[in-house]
């Protein structure tokens, strides 16, 4: 049975759940990160506490929002951690893996609730049973029943018992949010020393009964307890439900246990309104976050940021338009206008840089996935691998992070599977039996460069050539090493002699290349026999804005991304040659194919001879060429717009932009143009 | 409307869970009782919770408000008879004294 | 909201008074499209050509920061005369999550057609394929061809919507 009110709150509920899901994912990630960093070492007290807190807060949130299934595994996990922490159980290296599996189980449940993904209950039951076994097997104490209320004591770092008084004035919608007050209160009660917890509900007002909205919360709760927990730990109990001004915490460290067992019926707290947050108190930290760093951050919906980015993009276009209009005015007569416009341009650029920086996130988000992956794969393959990362704090656009993750994962798998040798083989060749896999990120100019380096056997030239021939890929013995390495990017190429379940599966480097290219990136390979392979991915800083050179061809304008441009020149007749019926230009001893934009794009123009136009020399994906245009127009920053939002993909373009005059101009995709040119 | 079952206006028996999901129906039911009681106020009203299998904060609040409303009309109002589980919930949620009528609210 | 209301009334088979249609002409024929699918009507200017597309894809325009493709239905259906001047009209359609502009000979009016007055489309010699016609209406003794604009925009014939080959690729790399 659903009441009308229940249905209405469905949307809201989802939004509130989202906060929990996010927190939960963060907690899981944090937990995993700590566990991985341990290797097989025993966690120190601080790490243990951090893991415990993560598990505890997942459990708490799950309880509050009614995801009871998620509390089951977390509960047993918490029990085990608690016993470990109190040295009731002796740490064993296998526990790390068990905790990791438990984390996976919880993540699966999370995905089940959030995205409706399938949940394998057996796997969860198994993990739970094994956790329970570990508890039972190692302790003389009676095993905890897995779903009972938590019996864990207050986290020990609190020190001396302190007397606290709390007042919680929830927002009126708290019931509609389906928040379970009983879970919150029970959790708070768990933090209290035995027998000290008091809870009193009070009605903040007495509205007329008939006209009262029964789903609206008018209750205010007051609690009194003695606890070893810190103020922040108490505040954390309310982290999903209370804003700062809805929770008051008073502490009386001087008071001893006996003094607070007074009945709390006497006015426990000065009765104050909703906003009665006393600034003089030590702030309980930003809710929903922990520790010092948290206080200066808050969550913003990604769509809001994207909207901001779009609006700044529009502003840039408007500014460009104004500049263009003003360019036609007499600079002496309109001096102050020009000055203002110059100022506007500076301000717009600054604003744009600030806004774009909001979208930047550290690459550690992706790198952090790998310790675990490497550990698992290495174990499966019987290889010994040390993973090193550097430049973890290198920032790149959020959108890129999501899209670079898969290609990087693939490269890492490849390196482990095909690159690094077995310990025996390594020892035999005089290498350290432990192989090294290095992930490094750095910002080089306007691009982010990510290297995946292994110290394995290097790429096998002969094998690659043989395989390419076998698969009908054009190649020859005389090819340079660089050209040979490029072969592995050919569709359907795979050097693994047998398909393993790690990186075989018929998916190859071609997909990596395609995915990286799709986000404006490039992939390069360097390899040395016996020394290893370095795969370098370079990405634009952001997807949203790029520096471009605008060029004109037959009345249309195009944008050439500046990062592919080497130089531009007006060729002399003696530089122009024909090779195999194709026009080329000789620049410093090198013959570059001439890509006539007008013929690739079927445009009519008067400039059909290279001598009369301009050649823009470009390099993309290691390929060089000369793009022939009518004229160069301007160098400008352009806002990248998707054509695919309302239309299909356009061959030869990497998106479009809006110019100062309001017209649309296509942004050229050079690698695609090269292949279009070859097909002409 | 699934709400049913009352004995008389001075001994109100709630039947079914007293929770957020049912609070709208419960409110309608109690509002009706409240209106009837306001016309001819008895000296005391007892709400019987024996047939309530579960209660949450939202249900507690509604019940507490109902009782307070009656007390406002100078009717001695209390709720009791709850099973162990429900009583524990009420205690945990801090509504015990409001239900017993021990601490009149402002 | 309006749209939902209409859809649900269709489902329930309730004889709603009338639906509104934007009527336009292509050559000598009058067509109507569901007014709820029309975002706006604007003039034809500043179209950027896109290479290697069929002739009826005129290119793309900047519609307040959004890039919108322009389809000339006159060329596509070989009617009227594909000339462009200050009176050339583009109807901006919003269907299937896409915003698309269509060029027609002229926009006439918005009319309300009683549901019962709409007849099923026979196989007839309209320039538009029967697949895209939902029915025939009558307006001032003139035949009005009602177009299923959503089906038309989404059709392979117009090549506006990609056949979404990209998804398979990302799935593969997830392996």
Image (cartoon, coloured by chain):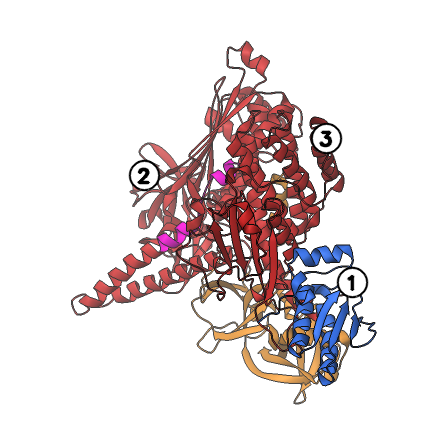
Name the secondary structure under disc 1.
loop
Q: Determine the chain carrying the residue at label 2.
A: A
Q: Determine the chain carrying the residue at label 1.
A: B
Place of residue A494 in the rendered image (x, y in percent of width and height, measured from the top left): 61, 29
Task: Give the crowd class for mark 2: few <14, some 14-19, many >=20 residues within 10 Å.
Answer: some
Q: Which mark is residue A623?
A: none
- Looking at the image, which residue sits at the far bottom? C140
Side of A652 where B12 appears, left or right: right
User: Mark 1 highlights which residue?
Assistant: B81
- Looking at the image, which residue sits at the far left? A332
Q: In the rendered image, what is the letter of the chain coloured red?
A: A
User: Mark 3 highlights which residue?
Assistant: A136
Magenta range is: A352-368
Q: Taking A153 as reference, is C157 above or below it?
A: below
Place of residue B34 in the rendered image (x, y in percent of width and height, measured from the top left): 71, 78
Name the secondary structure under disc 3.
helix
Mark 1 and mark 3: Cα distance apart in space: 40 Å
Place of residue A458 in the rendered image (x, y in percent of width and height, measured from the top left): 51, 21
Name the secondary structure under disc 2.
helix
**Can residue A273 be seen?**
yes
Q: Nearer the viewer, residue B51 or A267?
A: A267
Q: Could you confirm whether marks 1 and 3 are on the same chain? A: no
- The quadrant in which the N terminus of chain A is found is bottom right
Q: In the rendered image, what is the letter of the chain coloured blue?
A: B
Q: Taking A391 as reference, is A307 above or below it?
A: below
């Amino acid at each position: 049975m659903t009441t009308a009110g229940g249905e209405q709150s469905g949307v809201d509920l989802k939004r509130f759940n989202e906060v929990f899901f996010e927190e939960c994912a963060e907690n899981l990630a944090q937990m995993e990160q700590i566990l991985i960093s341990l290797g097989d070492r025993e966690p120190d007290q601080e790490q243990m506490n951090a893991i415990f807190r993560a598990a505890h807060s997942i459990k708490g949130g799950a309880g509050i929002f009614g995801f009871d299934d998620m509390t089951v595994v977390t509960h047993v996990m918490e029990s085990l951690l608690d016993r470990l922490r109190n040295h009731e159980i002796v740490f064993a290296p296998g526990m790390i893996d068990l905790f990791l599996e438990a984390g996976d189980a919880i993540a699966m449940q999370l995905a089940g609730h959030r995205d409706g993904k399938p949940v394998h209950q057996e796997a969860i039951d198994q993990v739970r049973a094994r956790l329970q076994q570990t508890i039972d097997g190692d302790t003389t104490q009676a095993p905890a029943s897995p779903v009972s209320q938590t019996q864990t004591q207050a986290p020990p770092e609190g020190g001396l018992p302190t007397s606290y008084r709390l007042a919680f004035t929830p927002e009126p919608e708290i019931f509609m949010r389906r928040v379970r007050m009983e879970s919150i209160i029970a959790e708070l009660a768990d933090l209290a020393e035995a027998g000290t917890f008091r809870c009193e509900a009070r009605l903040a007002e007495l509205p007329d009964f008939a006209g009262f909205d029964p789903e609206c919360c008018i209750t205010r709760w007051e609690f009194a307890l003695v606890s070893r927990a810190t103020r922040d730990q108490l505040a954390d109990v309310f982290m999903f439900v209370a804003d700062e001004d809805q929770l008051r915490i008073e502490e009386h460290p001087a008071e001893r246990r006996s003094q607070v067992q007074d009945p709390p019926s006497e006015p426990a707290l000065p009765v104050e309104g909703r906003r009665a947050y006393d600034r003089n108190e030590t702030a309980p930290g930003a809710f929903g976050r922990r520790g010092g760093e948290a206080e200066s951050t808050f969550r913003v919906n990604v769509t809001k940021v994207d909207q901001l980015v779009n609006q700044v993009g529009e502003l840039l276009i408007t500014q460009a338009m104004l500049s263009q209009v003003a360019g036609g005015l007499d600079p002496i007569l309109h001096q102050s206008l020009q000055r203002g416009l110059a100022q506007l341009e500076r301000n717009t650029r600054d604003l744009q840089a600030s806004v774009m920086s909001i979208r930047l996130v550290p690459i550690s988000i992706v790198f952090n996935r790998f310790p675990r992956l490497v550990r698992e794969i290495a174990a499966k393959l019987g290889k010994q691998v040390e993973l090193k990362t550097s430049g973890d704090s290198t920032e790149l656009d959020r959108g890129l992070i999501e899209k670079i993750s898969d290609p990087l994962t693939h490269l890492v798998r490849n390196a482990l599977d095909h690159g690094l040798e077995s310990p025996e083989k390594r020892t035999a060749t005089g290498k350290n039996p432990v192989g090294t896999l290095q992930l490094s990120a750095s910002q080089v100019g306007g691009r982010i460069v990510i290297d995946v380096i292994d110290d394995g056997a290097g790429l096998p030239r002969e094998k690659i050539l043989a395989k390419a021939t076998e698969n009908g890929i054009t190649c020859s013995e005389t090819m340079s090493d660089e050209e040979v390495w490029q072969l592995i990017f050919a569709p359907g190429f795979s050097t693994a002699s047998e398909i393993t379940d790690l990186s075989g599966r018929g998916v190859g480097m071609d997909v990596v290349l395609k995915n990286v290219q799709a986000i404006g990136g490039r992939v390069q390979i360097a390899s040395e026999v016996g020394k290893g392979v370095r795969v370098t991915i370079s990405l634009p800083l952001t997807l949203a804005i790029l520096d471009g050179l605008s060029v004109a061809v037959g009345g249309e304008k195009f944008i050439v991304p500046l990062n592919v441009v080497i130089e531009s020149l007006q060729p002399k007749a003696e530089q122009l040659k024909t090779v195999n019926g194709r026009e080329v230009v000789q620049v410093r001893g090198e013959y570059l194919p001439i890509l006539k934009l007008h013929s690739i794009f079927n445009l009519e123009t008067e400039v059909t001879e290279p001598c009369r136009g301009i050649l823009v020399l470009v390099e993309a994906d290691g390929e060089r060429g000369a793009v022939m245009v009518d004229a160069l127009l301007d160098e400008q920053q352009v806002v990248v717009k998707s054509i695919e939002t309302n239309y299909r993909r356009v061959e030869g373009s990497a998106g479009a932009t809006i110019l100062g005059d309001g017209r649309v101009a296509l942004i050229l995709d050079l690698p695609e143009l090269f292949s279009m040119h070859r097909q002409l | 409307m699934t709400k049913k079952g009352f004995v008389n206006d001075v001994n109100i028996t709630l039947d079914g869970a007293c929770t957020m999901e049912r609070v709208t129906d419960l409110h309608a039911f109690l509002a009706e009782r409240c209106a009837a009681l306001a016309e001819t106020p008895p000296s005391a009203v007892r709400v019987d919770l024996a047939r309530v299998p579960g209660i949450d904060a939202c249900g507690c609040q509604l019940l507490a408000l109902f009782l307070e409303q009656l007390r406002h009309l100078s009717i001695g109002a209390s709720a009791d008879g709850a099973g162990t589980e429900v009583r524990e919930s009420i205690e945990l949620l801090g509504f015990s004294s409001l239900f017993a009528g021990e601490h009149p609210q402002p | 909201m309006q749209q939902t209301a209409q859809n649900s009334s269709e489902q329930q088979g309730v004889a709603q008074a009338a639906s509104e249609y934007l009527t336009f002409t292509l050559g000598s024929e009058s067509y109507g499209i569901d007014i709820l699918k029309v975002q706006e009507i604007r003039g034809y200017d500043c179209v950027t050509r896109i290479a290697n597309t069929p002739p009826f894809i005129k290119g793309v325009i900047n519609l307040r920061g959004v890039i919108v493709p322009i389809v000339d239905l006159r060329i596509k259906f070989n009617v009227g005369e594909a000339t462009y001047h200050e009176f050339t009209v583009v109807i901006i359609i919003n269907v299937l999550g896409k915003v698309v502009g269509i060029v027609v000979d002229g926009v006439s009016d918005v009319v309300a057609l009683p549901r019962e007055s709409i007849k099923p489309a026979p196989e007839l010699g309209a320039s538009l394929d029967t697949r895209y016609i939902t029915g025939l209406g009558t307006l001032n003794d003139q035949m009005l061809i009602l177009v299923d604009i959503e089906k038309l925009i989404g059709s392979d014939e117009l090549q506006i919507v990609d056949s979404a080959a990209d998804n398979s690729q990302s799935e593969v790399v997830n392996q």
